[in-house]
Amino acid sequence: MIEFHLDGQSGLSPYQQLVQQVRHALRLGLLKEGDRLPTVKEVARQTAVNPNTVLKAYRELEHEGLVAARPGVGTFVTRTLAGASLAAHGPLRQELSRWLTKARLAGLDEESIEALFLSTFRNAAGEDVA
């Protein structure tokens, strides 16, 4: 089951963070069709947000066709976002882990690593478009 974590400095609202975390879990194969999401009360208690915030996130996911609410039973995943590339995740994760270790050994802190990654990612994405 997914465990939500909110970051007050992410720049995203709590409901957007919840939606994003479910999408990421679906993309990475951590959530599969038929899996039950935590109840609204569980998420609200775990993340210290208003239950309406969780409901808003769950409604958006439902609107996207990713989950379905079953009254009295819970909210269940109806569609995954993991594609055929899921098999490549393991080796890529290992390579990225090695890169992160090198970055830390080079003296970069978490914020510097994130900035370097995002900058490189955006530049590479721009090159693909051109």
Image (cartoon, helix red, strand yellow):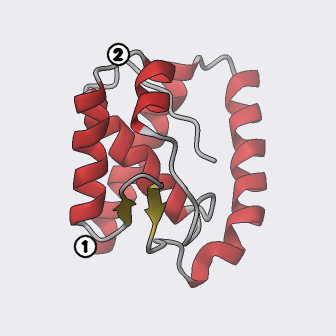
Determine the image quadrant of residue 127.
bottom left
Expressed as whole percent of the image width and height from the top left, the position of residue 4 reads 51, 33
State how far apart marks 1 and 2 are (Cα): 33 Å
Q: Is residue 125 left or right of residue 21?
A: left
Q: Rate crowding at label 1 as few (under 14), some (14 to 19) or many (20 or more) other CA atoms within 10 Å.
A: few
Expressed as whole percent of the image width and height from the top left, the position of residue 129 reads 25, 73
Q: How many marks?
A: 2
What's the residue type where badge 1 is placed?
Answer: Val
Determine the image quadrant of residue 124.
bottom left
Determine the image quadrant of residue 56.
top left
Residue 44 in sight = yes
Of residues 25 and 98, the one nearer the viewer is 25
- Identified at 31% across, 49% down, the residue is 58
- Identified at 58% across, 62% down, the residue is 35
- Give the quarter of the figure containing the C terminus: bottom left
Residue 77 vertical position relative to residue 23 in the rendered view, above or below: below
Q: Is residue 33 left or right of residue 22?
A: right
At mark 1, the secondary structure is helix
Expressed as whole percent of the image width and height from the top left, the position of residue 106 reads 70, 23
Q: Rate crowding at label 2 as few (under 14), some (14 to 19) or many (20 or more) other CA atoms within 10 Å.
A: few
The residue beneath circle 1 is: 129
- Identified at 55% across, 56% down, the residue is 36
Residue 43 vertical position relative to residue 118 in the rendered view, above or below: above
Disc marking residue 69: none
> Comparing marks 1 and 2, which lies closer to the viewer?
2
Of residues 109 and 93, the one nearer the viewer is 93
The residue beneath circle 2 is: 8
At mark 2, the secondary structure is loop
